[in-house]
Image: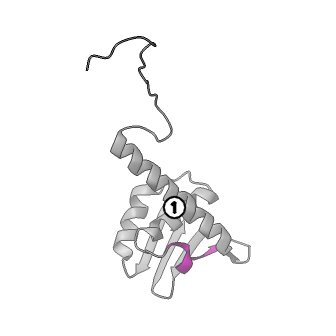
Amino acid sequence: MLYRVEVSQNFTVDLLEHRKANAIGRSSKTVREFLERNHKDDMDREETIKLTVKSLLEVVQTGAKNIEVAIMAPGATIEMLPVEDIESYVKNIEQEKQEEAAKKKTGRTPGTGSAAILTRASGEASDS
């Protein structure tokens, strides 16, 4: 199965299920290196599409607006991923990036942890 993504007519990403990934066009080296670092042999269709979109977000600043995804499989017609699906992938990827940044900044996962508030019983004097 081959996954191909084109940003305008200047950039294309091909992902082959058989451990091959390629990018051509402007910033292709950056995308190819990203794919080499993050592609896994056991990725399913959803993971592969997500990785493809994620790789393009490394070099495209406008999000889903300039991304089209065409999925080609043996014996099947070319499937264009709907814009809404691409926007959903972009939104999820951006949310994951924000969570990872927050985790690195605080050293913990957002929304986890505990806090304690110390109060004085009524009638206790303050030391000030």
Q: Is residue 56 left or right of residue 106?
A: right
Q: Which residues are magenta?
A: 63-71
Whether residue 17 appears in this view of the structure is no
**For this view, does 112 lie left or right of residue 26?**
right
Residue drawn 73% across the image and 73% down it: 75
Magenta residue check for 117: no
Q: From the image, tell me which residue sits under label 1.
A: 51
Image coordinates for residue 91, horizontal then vertical, percent:
56, 62
The secondary element bearing badge 1 is classed as: helix
Please give the name of the residue rendered at 52% of the width and 59% of the height, measured from the top-left corner.
93
Residue 6 sits above or below residue 114 on the image: below
Horizontal and vertical percent position of residue 108: 41, 37
Residue 15 x/y as whole percent: 52, 68
Question: Which quadrant, please, contains the C terminus?
Answer: top left
Q: Quadrant of the N terminus?
A: bottom right
The three-letter code of the residue at mark 1 reads: Leu
Q: Is residue 115 above or below residue 42?
A: above
Spot the residue most to the right.
Answer: 76
At x 50% / y 88%, what residue is drawn? Answer: 9
**Along the line of sight, the residue nearer the viewer: 106 or 4:** 106
Magenta stretch: residue 65 in it? yes
Label 1 CA crowd tier, 10 Å (few <14, some 14–19, many 20+): many
